[in-house]
Image (cartoon, grey):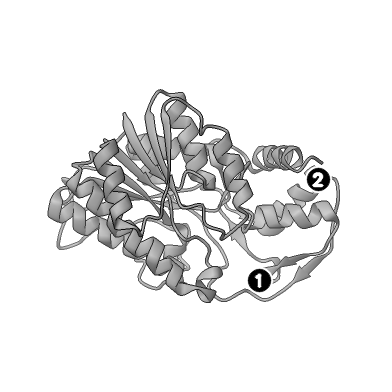
Amino acid sequence: MRILVTGTAGFIGAALAQRLLARGDEVLGIDNHNDYYDPSLKEARLAQFVDHAAYTHLRADLADAEAVDRAFAQFQPQRVVNLAAQAGVRYSLKNPRAYVRSNLDGFLNILEGCRHGKVEHLVYASSSSVYGANRKMPFAVEDAVDHPVSLYAASKKANELMAHAYSHLYGLPTTGLRFFTVYGPWGRPDMSPMLFADRISRGEPIDVFNFGNHSRDFTYIDDIVEGVVRTLDHPAQPDPSYDAENPNPGTSNAPYRVYNIGNDQPVQLMRFIELLEQNLGRTVEKNLLPMQPGDVPDTWADVSALRRDVGYAPDTSIEDGVARFVEWYREYHGS
């Protein structure tokens, strides 16, 4: 198939592009290479596949409607995976306008491209952050997500609402995936696994928020990519059992779906740090601090809907995943 993937210089986008190329798809990747974090890491990810015969790279911003329209018209994708976004909960407190430009304006341009290009299926990145102040565990797609605690989370909830409008109005099949704490080789340097690994490897103290009482549904990158591909290959369909008088937020009478994609096995943050220390061969001091604004104490994905509909079955244990991450980390940094 011809598949347009946005964010292919990013963590998940680069891994997904390689998986699609390996199975024989033709991929157009779009990324704006912004400097939210070290652009050299983005270039290194791309270097793994940018010269593949079936891959074409476009350096463009999704908020540039003309560039996006031109990409759709020239490539004529059959399916689209939108992973590009301004990421980061904490950064959204400092630079909120970046989230409107990328996550709202940019996503609208993708929706318009899919609509006019008669795309068969749009899969897009949502986030576990949409659960916000919700404290019911595990988080399920049937739960209300009306109380975001960051603008980043609000922008991702807005994406789900925008997608539903296009599914309803134009029959565009859309599937939103709420990612839960993705980690692994080539991960983002602004996320805790890389931040902790950097400081542990240098023997420096690490800041641990919520006094170490966080738990996260850490999900290994390979399991995430497997779930994205399975979802992409199953275009959303109207739910024949949808009841408009008792609506299910995860489905619709339009071709629309929302799923959690996680490991369904939350891990205490202190356990994750312990595994990093074991694999890096060093223990460090922990500065136990209060929870930061916009953060949530715990996440846990109920992935039963994704298991049922596409056969999603994450199988990477936290012990194996951390060991593989540290192996890559040492090789990448030459240590």
Is residue 149 among the parts visible in the rendering?
A: no
Question: x and y percent of residue 62 in the render?
Answer: 37, 55
- Discs 1, 2 touching: Cβ within 8 Å: no
Q: Secondary structure at mark 2?
A: helix
Q: Is residue 250 above or below residue 25?
A: below
Question: Residue placed at 55% from the left, 69% from the top?
Answer: 91
Question: x and y percent of residue 24 in the render?
Answer: 40, 23
Q: Is residue 258 above or below residue 155?
A: above
Neighbor class of circle 1 (other Cα within 10 Å; few <14, some 14-19, many 20+) is some
Closer to viewer: mark 1 or mark 2: 2
> Is 24 left or right of 181, judged from the image as shown?
left
Is residue 94 among the parts visible in the rendering?
A: yes
Residue 210's tag is 1
Neighbor class of circle 2 (other Cα within 10 Å; few <14, some 14-19, many 20+) is some
Residue 280's tag is 2
Q: Amino acid under label 1?
A: Asn
Question: Residue placed at 56% from the left, 76% from the top?
Answer: 293
Among the two numbered marks 1 and 2 on one chain, the one whose residue lies closer to the N terminus:
1
Q: Check the picture and name the quadrant holding the C terminus.
A: top right
Question: Residue placed at 41% from the left, 35% from the top?
Answer: 56
Q: CA distance from mark 1 to mark 2?
A: 24 Å
Question: x and y percent of residue 208 in the render?
Answer: 71, 66
> Is 271 left or right of 15, judged from the image as shown?
right
Q: Amino acid under label 2?
A: Leu
> Is 63 left or right of 315, judged from the image as shown?
left
Q: Check the picture and name the quadrant holding the N terminus.
A: top left
Q: Nearer the viewer, residue 14 or 210?
A: 14
Please count the marks in the image. 2
Question: x and y percent of residue 149 in the render?
Answer: 46, 73
Q: Secondary structure at mark 1?
A: helix
Residue 36's tag is none
